[in-house]
Amino acid sequence: MLKVSVFTNGAAQPAERIVPHSWIHAISPSEDELARLQDCGIATDLLLHVLDFEERSRVIKRGDIVYLVIHLPYKEQVDSEIPYATAPISVVLLPEYLITIESREIGLFEKLVENPPSGLAPHNKTQFVLNLILLAGLDYLKCLHEINMAIDQTEDHLQRSLRNREVLQLLNYQKSLVYFSTALNSIELMLEKLRKGGFIEISSGDQELAEDALIEIRQAVYLVDIAQSILTQMMDAFASIVSNNLNTVMKFLAAITIIISVPTLIASIYGMNVPLPGESAAQTFIYLLALSILLSIAVIIVFLRKDWL
């Protein structure tokens, strides 16, 4: 799907066809749409990179064409094992066009249109790229906040859990953090390359925006490292907690089994089909019942004193 927009007073307005100095946004482009993008001036080999979902964050310059890949975070479907992942966003800076391509739909177009940054214009591609990286950093921070909240909720369940489901949930969040860490480190290196020049022109006025973007990315990297460290320690600790909870339940069940076995033993003895003392007396049943209760209470007291129950 292709969305063509032109800029009027810093706002993106939809256009019916591709015109010079327009912004072209593609979402999972088909072969026909890729052919239209190629007509705009994108090389064939670059289009192959666009279709690669595993493409890492980087920047390439060929003549007057600059090609960037930025990984943005997104939330997976509810039934997915991994709650969060990253997807590459390709940005192609052409002399007359600004092209962004999503390998899968993650809502980038809507974010930029609803809250357009100051540099959302094809004639100021530097600010567009820097604002996009800044947006990526803010998205990562938002996802990290949601992950931390989800981990806290899982932690509450883990304290009473006897199953591995919660531990596996933490493992899935750890996988998401690995994706985040890899993507953020690549974005940080790419941003450092952009600041050194040679790919896009960064004026003195753009330096502050570049610094803001770098601060957000580094803050996200820092928070990911902290979350990974805490999550690793939590998984080790709660694996022991699950085992201890299971041992506590097994100890309780074993104690209950022993307590119940006392009256069961007495009933088994007097249930034998042989002559037994007092079997003809009417009060024998009451005596046996009282004896069973007293012995069970004695066993319970012993278990309580030894902290076995």
Image (cartoon, rainbow, N blue to C red):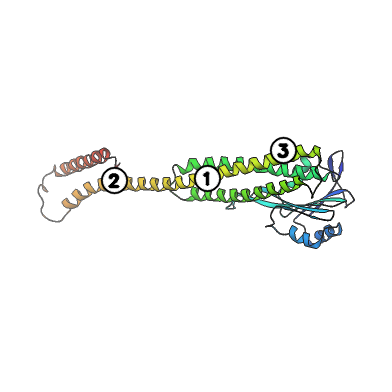
**Placement of the C terminus among the 4 image quadrants:** top left
Question: Which residue does the numbered mark 3 point to in the structure image?
Answer: 212
What is the quadrant of residue 130 in the picture?
Answer: top right
**CB-based contact (under 8 Å), mark 2 and mark 1:** no
Measured as percent of width and height from the top left, residue 72 is found at 69, 48
- From the viewer's perspective, tell me whether residue 120 is left or right of residue 140: right
Q: How many marks?
A: 3
Looking at the image, is mark 3 or mark 1 nearer the viewer?
3
Given residues 291 and 16, the one toward you in this image is: 16
Measured as percent of width and height from the top left, residue 266 is found at 18, 48
**Placement of the N terminus among the 4 image quadrants:** bottom right
Give residue 169's mark: none
Q: Sort mark 2 into few (<14), some (14-19) or many (20+) by Cα contacts within 10 Å.
A: some
Looking at the image, is mark 2 or mark 1 nearer the viewer?
1
Task: Of the two numbered discs 3 and 1 on the same chain, state the one appearing first in sequence.
Answer: 3
Question: Which residue does the numbered mark 1 point to in the structure image?
Answer: 231
Amino acid carrying label 3: it is Asp
- From the viewer's perspective, tell me whether residue 216 is left or right of residue 256: right
Task: Of the two numbered discs 2 and 1 on the same chain, state the one appearing first in sequence.
Answer: 1
Amino acid carrying label 2: it is Ala
Q: Sort mark 1 into few (<14), some (14-19) or many (20+) by Cα contacts within 10 Å.
A: some
Measured as percent of width and height from the top left, residue 25 is found at 80, 51
Task: Of the two numbered discs 2 and 3 on the same chain, state the one appearing first in sequence.
Answer: 3
SS at badge 1: helix
Question: Which residue does the numbered mark 2 point to in the structure image?
Answer: 255
